[in-house]
Every structure is written in C-alpha cells, then in structure tokens.
Image: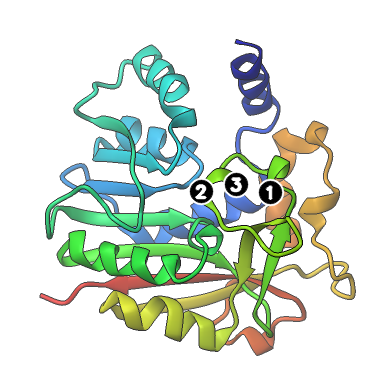
Amino acid sequence: MAGRFSRSARYLIRPISYWRSLEFRLVWEHGDFQSSNRVLDIGSPKPFCLYLAESVGAEVHATDIEPYFINEYTALRDGRGISPERLRIEAADGRSLPYPDGYFDRVYSVSVLEHIPGAGDSDCVREIGRVLAAGGICLITVPFWPEGHDVYRDASKFYWSGSSASSDEGKVFYQRRYDEEDLKRRLIEPSGLRVERLLYVGERVLTRRKGEIGDLLPPITGLIDPLLSRVAHSRPVTDWRDLAKPLCAFLKLVKLA
C-alpha cells in the first residue's frame, strides 16, 4: 500500500518526466495513430497508453516484463471509465511475445530495448517484426552516444534487475547506449523492417557536461518538465554529428506489405 501511494504521489508531482515528454512527443508525431488501430506498448512508461486508449480510442495492449504495474493501471483504467477491451494490461516478455503473427497495426517501445541484456534487444525487434501487420509502424527510442557502451548498476537501483544479467563485479546490467553501428546491427537489421525515419535528439545547453540535465532535476520540477524539455532539448536531426551532445535515437520502422 505504501509503495502504491508513493508511486501515485510521484505521478502527481511528475506525470511525464523531462525525457519521456520528448520521447512520447516523437512517438505521437510519427505514429499516425487511429481509433481502428490495435497497438502494442512494449515496456514503455504507461501514461501514453492511457492517452491512446482514452483519447484516440485505439485498442492498446500495455505490457512489461514484470507485473508491478498491473493493479495500479487497472485501477487507473477503471477509474477513467476505459473498458478492459480498449486497454489490456498484461505482463509479457518482449523477447517472446504471446501474440499471433501480424496482430498489431502499431508497436512502440519508449526507452526499453536498451535495458534488455545480451542479444535480447535483437530478439525483441524480431518479435516486433513478427507481430506487426503488413503496412504497420514500429516506433522506438533508445539512448545514443557516438561510441556505444554498456552501463551496470546495483540491483537495488531498478525494479527489473531480477530479469537482467549480473557482471563479475556483482553489479547488474542496466542499459546500453547505442552508436550508429549498434542501431543498424542490433535493431534495424534483425527487425526485418524498413527504416522510414531515423532521428537523433540531444541537449543544447551544458553540452560540455558528460551527464544530462535530467539527472540534475529534483522531483519538484516535475510539473514543468515538458517545458524544460522544449527549452533544453535540441530539434530532431537526421545526422547525429549535427548535434553538440547527441543523447537519443528515434526509429520509425515500417513492415512492407
């Protein structure tokens, strides 16, 4: 109960965080979501799925590898009068999705694939390619850096650590930052999908810092995080070399008929 209350308070203070406000905006602008769509959310932060189900009227399947969110978002769904048929809340592993071939018109995954250890990110995009219908759209955001690298953290720092991989030093794989070659080799080629758009976004302030502005923001700024994002984030570009500090890659992939 205490955990659920603290999460609810966090959502009130920071409904959409600094980075997610940018990533959701990219997914929304390029997704062409329709009420007739069947949409799969793979592990993304869940406010966007509520919006798609309630405001767009799409049939949304919201998933994550751990069931931590099911009770909470079932209550939010029911409280907002969204039918269970319109918003399905399910635990699922993106590396082995429990859906038939060609089942979804749209699939999106916001800042998730980078957290899957080993070759799991490639396994996940293969599954996306399998469950996506002909002509369907896949939208993905991942962290980017000119030289790709992996990041490990203490297991207590993130909820899915039990589903990740440990290092010899006792820490657990947290995420990878993709470089240009990683995007091609780990995500684009295994998916079997055609690239329609590949964009890069970074920060245009404090560009000499290795850290990100989002790491410095206290929770009290939560209500203005979307505004801070519009001020501090760069415009999307097609070549990361045009950015002083590239930090995020956005992919729009399409399944050919």
Q: Measure the C-alpha gap from mark 1 to mark 3.
A: 23 Å
Residue at (24% x, 40% y) in the render: 58
User: What is the three-letter code of the residue carrying label 3?
Assistant: Ser
Which residue is at the front of the view, 253 or 35?
253
Q: How many residues crowd mark 3 within 10 Å: few (<14), some (14–19), many (20+)?
A: some
Q: Is residue 230 left or right of residue 128?
A: right
- Mark 2 element type: helix
Q: Nearer the viewer, mark 1 or mark 3?
A: 3
Task: State whether residue 195 appears in this view.
Answer: no
Say which mark, if any, is on residue 161: 3
User: Residue 214: percent from the left, percent from the top?
Assistant: 77, 52
Which residue is at the front of the view, 43 or 34?
43
State which quarter of the image contains the N terminus. Answer: top right
Which residue is at the front of the view, 83 or 88?
88
Q: Quadrant of residue 84?
A: top left
- Mark 1 element type: helix
Say which mark, if any, is on residue 18: 1
Say which mark, if any, is on residue 191: none
User: What is the three-letter code of the residue carrying label 1?
Assistant: Tyr
Say which mark, if any, is on residue 163: 2
